[in-house]
Image (tube, helix red, strand yellow):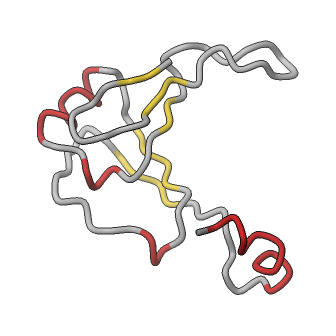
Amino acid sequence: MEVGWAGIHNAGDLGGLPGRLGSTQFGRILRMPRPDTLTERGWAELVCSGVRTLIDLRDTDEIAELPLRLASVSSIHRPIGDQSDVEFMELMAPFLD
């Protein structure tokens, strides 16, 4: 389901995805692209949606300083791509750009 926060395009609720233990709950896991494009209104909308933690899966060199930040939203950085892993990069390089 599409989520509309000012400054963000292609954000969505991952509720309803099937899993081994049933489907994910709506309003629990949301995905979005880079948060640094959120406007002040977008941050307020994100908080009103119940978001309390951002988990950023991007590599360190992809992350820009967030121009706006709310104390009520924490951030965790857990990159999923290891650019120093030669085997990973050979396999995934065509998809990373």
Q: Please tell me which residue is depicted at 25% across the width and 21% down the height of the picture.
A: 48
69 relative to 47, above or below: below
Q: Is residue 74 left or right of residue 88?
A: left
> Where is residue 39 drawn, in percent x and y?
16, 43
Q: Nearer the viewer, residue 17 or 2?
A: 2
Q: Please tell me which residue is depicted at 64% across the width and 67% down the height of the picture.
A: 96
Q: Is residue 39 left or right of residue 19?
A: left
84 relative to 4, above or below: below
Quarter of image, res 59: bottom right
Q: Please tell me which residue is depicted at 41% across the width and 40% down the height of the picture.
A: 53
Label count reads: 0
Q: Which quadrant holds the C terminus?
A: bottom right
> Where is residue 5 drawn, in percent x and y?
27, 30
> Where is residue 55 drawn, in percent x and y?
49, 48
Quarter of image, res 73: top left
> Where is residue 88 drawn, in percent x and y?
80, 75
Q: Please tell me which residue is depicted at 13% across the width and 33% down the height of the picture.
A: 41
60 relative to 5, above or below: below
Q: Is residue 82 left or right of residue 50?
A: right
